[in-house]
Image: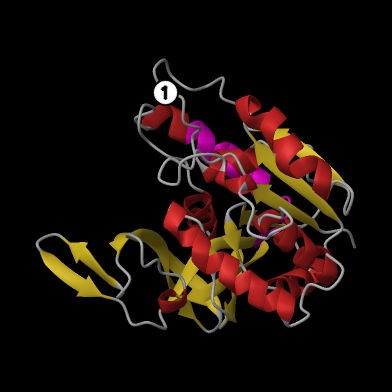
Amino acid sequence: MDITLVVMAAGMGSRFGGLKQAEPITEDGKGILDFSVYDAKKAGFTKAVFIIREDMKEDFLRLVGHRIEKTIPTEYVIQDTSALPAGRTKPFGTGHAILCCRGVVNEPFAIINADDYYGANAFYAMAEHLRNAKPGEYAMTAYEVGKTLSPNGTVSRGVCEVENGYLKKVTETCGIASDATYPAGDKTCALALDTPVSMNLWGLTPDIFDRLSEDFDTFLKSADLQKAEFYIPSVISSAVDRGLATVKVYHNADRWYGITYRADLAKIKEAVKGYIDNGLYNGI
């Protein structure tokens, strides 16, 4: 069965500064996406779809796309901005980005962030799940929060409540520091370092597009469109709550790496170099 890797690459990267999706992490100019696509293809994914913005298309193709096209069948989806109100330039969020893939992605698919390194192991369980998934049988890969934090500033994470191997709830938690503490009103709370969190590695079946369309219509009618975001976890949680879907949780004990801040680059360069030296990426 064909399964597709959908890469959300339309983010602004304001805290990083610049097109971080294309930032080289190796001496020969490869970026995180080269390694994510390599890992996904090795696990059995048969196509890559990149969600980008119209204003970044030329740079993205030049710096990333044309290189990856040589390794896997590739398509591009432009995140539509026609519904943005006057004065807003930032897209509506991850849920809207995935909705823009309707008609392009017609098979089970995984979604990832373009600027996150998930590790080779993350894609195998997801690929196996998707090859056997019936409509509404979704999945996610959960990481231990302590292995996802940045020493260079606070981050937001989707804290997961899991029961009998399935997702019950995701709570977006903001301002998490490198020691896993975060503000909650006038208090400081702390997460256990092994708390499972979502890093936007989801496995979905095409029926999600109906859920996305319904919820996006509601969002457009009720949200503050100048500031609100339409997030994919919210749509998935709503489908679970209504009994329209289940989400199998696959726990990954590997360290996750991302580029939230420019200073994060050094750590990921060091990590990927180690993987290369150990032979994990022979032939890439």
Viewed as shown, does residue 132 lie left or right of 260? right
The quadrant in which the C terminus is found is bottom right
Let me know if residue 102 appears in the view.
no
Residue at horizontal 69 percent and vertical 59 percent from the top: 27
What residue does disc 1 label? 88
Q: Say above or below: 54 vs 72.
A: above
Farthest residue toward the top?
Answer: 86
Let me know if residue 266 appears in the view.
yes
Residue 63 placement (x, y as % from top left) = 72, 40
Which contiguous range is marked in magenta?
203-218
Viewed as shown, does residue 282 lie left or right of 78? right
Snapshot quadrant of residue 154: bottom left
Residue 236 placement (x, y as % from top left) = 54, 56
Residue at horizontal 59 percent and vertical 39 percent from the top: 10
Q: Residue 147 colored magenta? A: no
The quadrant in which the N terminus is found is bottom right
Residue 114 placement (x, y as % from top left) = 62, 51
